[in-house]
Image: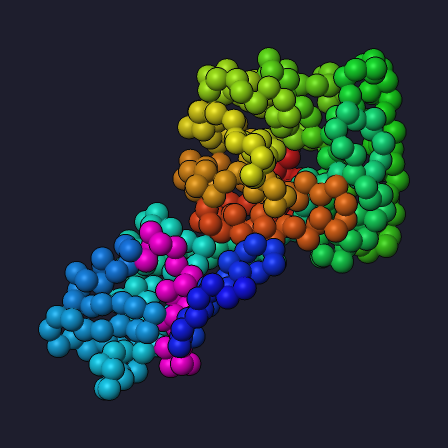
Amino acid sequence: RVIEKGDVSASILLPSGVRVDMKVQSPRSFGSLLQHFTGSKHHNIKLREYAQKIGLSLSERGIKVVKGKKDVSFGTYNQKERIYEFEKEEDFYLALGLKWIPPELREDSGEIEVALTEEGFPKLVDVGDLRGDLQVHSSFDVETSHDLGLSSIEEIVEYASQMGYEYVALTEHNPSQRGHTEAQVIDILKRKKEKIEQINDSLSKQGRIKKLFNSLEIDILPNGKLAISERALEILDFALVSIHSSFRLDKDKMTKRVLSALENPKVKILAHPTARKLTKREGVEIDWEKVFDYCSKNRKWIEINADPMRLDLPDYLVKQAINKGVKLTIGTDAHHVDHLKNIIYGIYVARRGWAKKSDIVNTSSLEDFEKMLK
């Protein structure tokens, strides 16, 4: 239904319950309109405060000079309306003496200050920079108590090849602790390793992705121990660890729990680190300063989980991690080949956290990634 409408704006309600606000401008002012509707509220407030200090007034229609006789470059002056109009968003920012600010960074988190500098912004990571996916669940039956993947390893190879990847980490959940002896777990993981080795032997001949990594997503138990033994860990190329239970431990205990799990040499990645599920579960309480410091000093990586229900590590923590020198991975947590395309959501989160290509581990070539594992 139409909520309200006017000459240049309207609000409508879709059958899904989503509200859509629409604004219309002439092409001459479209850049101003795009900036007005793209920037977050906090960014736009800060931008308008900055403009006022230099004698300008901003709106979705353009820029007005309110103090002095300042000429505004990069825009077209509308004599009748006494306003400078901008076809392109980039020119709107340039008229304010600012470098263009990528939309993902418009959160009043220091972006205006950076836009005033000579060097401006770093080039943010893009989906084309990725060389692999570091969390994918196949249907190989590891007899897990969690959800098993729905697509075969062969299907994953085919889809990942179409995406242009060099490598994929197969990260099924660990075999369930109940009903399995250590020997049984080791037998299951050896069978998976043999399967991966057979497929890897064929990959070089077929010219598809170059390598599958034999990995596992392992539960961090409440006491910080891992849900499989040291002998079982040795079978893996590397491991991810994650929290799937006891979400309400206090901050100190949860931090110790995570740090204890990361101590194992086979563990490289802390997966979906806050364990949040959007609209369903808040993230756990962790002293991120301690975790980031540990990861930076010990070459451990933290995941940006691209599952739309997680988007975890959150963007503000991505920025903090990068500032501490922590390297990040992006994984889809795919349980079906169709989920591999969700990688774009991980990229969006990374960009909102100011991540560059060099901040993301799986932008590395296969050769470089293998060196990083060692």
Q: Nearer the viewer, residue 349 or 20?
A: 20
Q: Position of residue 354 (x, y in %)?
A: 44, 49
- What residue lies at 46% left-to-right and 46% top-to-bottom? 353
Left or right: 62 in relation to 70: right
Q: Quadrant of the N terminus?
A: bottom right
- What residue lies at 25% left-to-right and 82% top-to-bottom? 81
Q: Nearer the viewer, residue 311 or 18?
A: 18
Quadrant in the rendering for residue 301: top right
Left or right: 57 in relation to 173: left
- What residue lies at 28% left-to-right and 59% top-to-bottom? 47
* Residue 176 versus residue 163 in the image, above or below: above
Dominant secondary-structure state across the stretch colored magenta? helix
* Residue 153 versus residue 248 in the image, above or below: below
* Residue 56 versus residue 45 in the image, above or below: below
- What residue lies at 53% left-to-right and 52% top-to-bottom? 348
Q: Position of residue 70 (x, y in %)?
A: 16, 75
Q: Quadrant of the C terminus?
A: top right
Over which residues does the magenta segment extend? 25-44
Residue at the extreme bottom of the image, as rendered: 80
Residue at the extreme left of the image, as rendered: 68
Residue 308 drawn in magenta: no
Q: Position of residue 245 (x, y in %)?
A: 63, 22
* Residue 288 versus residue 361 in the image, above or below: above
